[in-house]
Amino acid sequence: MRYITATRWTIASMAVLLMILPAAFADGGNQVSQSITMTGEGGYVSQNAANAAVVSGSNNYVNQDITQNAQGDYITQSAANAAVVVGDNNIVGQRVDQDASGNSIAQSGANAVAVVGNNNDVTQDVTQRAYGDEIYQTGWNSGTIAGDGNLLRQRTFAHARTRPIRRVADPVQTMSNFAYIMGFYNTVDQDIIGYAMVGSGNGPITQSGCNLIQTPEMGWNEFGQRISFAGRSGPGSEVMQSAKNEVWIG
């Protein structure tokens, strides 16, 4: 049920973007590049960033990139890319890259895209790396594409490593990829990769991931889903891993 709720939230967000953001219109092709880079060091570090774009026309190129790097005691990193593209022969790239070193670390990264048209090429990537004591990582990609001959790549990667401490640390990783495709001759490729290593402590590790693809079409589509988790902790600890790949056709 949470994926249905997330889908409704994504569609509602895209509708709001269409109403409030100026759009670029051209048949000759639009090029939109958005980049945010953040570097912070201190006791309490909070980093928040977002890119949003609405583009209409043919031969569009949209690239959204957010990079966050932080060192400190208590770190919060939040990043999101959102794009709506209407037209043919579109290339869309969305990337979130987060790196943090500290005591308590919370990382959240998200990409959301809605594309209407044919021969679209979309890539979504969330990469998170953390080195500290208490680590919480959340990454997700959501893509909605309507048209034929589309290619959608979705990847979430999380790496958590705790410092060699005596007290308990418990890294938590939650990742998901969601795709809704309307049309034929579409290709969707989803990857989830998670690594979590606890230092000298015996803290529990929690890793969860879900790939979900939905399409009302009954044929001429190609879907690939992969999940890979690696968790290492002490002999008296728990490593809890849950993974699910789902494809709903028709």
Image (cartoon, rainbow, N blue to C red):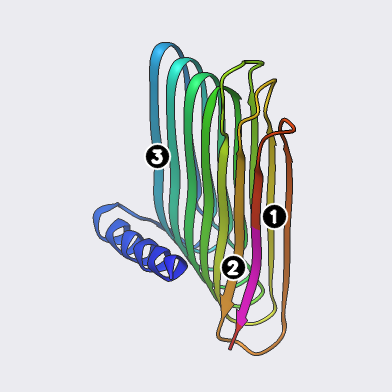
Q: Main secondary structure of the magenta part?
A: strand
Q: Quadrant of residue 157?
A: top right
Q: Which residue shows up at 30% across the image and 52% down it?
A: 22
Query: What is the C-alpha distance between the residues marked 1 and 3?
Result: 23 Å
The answer to which of marks 3 and 2 sits earlier in the sequence is 3
Question: Neighbour class for label 3 at 10 Å: few (<14), some, many (≥20)?
Answer: some
Tell me the kind of residue under disc 1: Asp
Dot label at residue 212:
2
Mark 3: which secondary structure? Answer: strand
Q: Quadrant of residue 55?
A: bottom left
Q: Residue furthest left?
A: 20
Q: Is residue 62 above or below residue 212?
A: above
Is residue 78 a member of the stretch shown in magenta? Answer: no
Mark 1: which secondary structure? Answer: strand
Question: Neighbour class for label 2 at 10 Å: few (<14), some, many (≥20)?
Answer: some
| Residue bearing mark 3 | 50
Q: Nearer the viewer, residue 228 or 145?
A: 228
Mark 2: which secondary structure? Answer: strand
The answer to which of marks 1 and 2 sits earlier in the sequence is 1
The residue range painted magenta reads 243-248
Q: Residue furthest front?
A: 236
**In which quadrant is the C terminus drawn?**
bottom right
Asked whether, in this view, residue 214 is left or right of residue 75, the answer is right
| Residue bearing mark 1 | 191
Dot label at residue 129:
none
Give percent across and percent down for residue 45.
Answer: 40, 18
Marks counted in the figure total 3
Q: Which residue shows up at 75% across the image and 33% down it?
A: 235
Give percent across and percent down for residue 53.
Answer: 40, 50
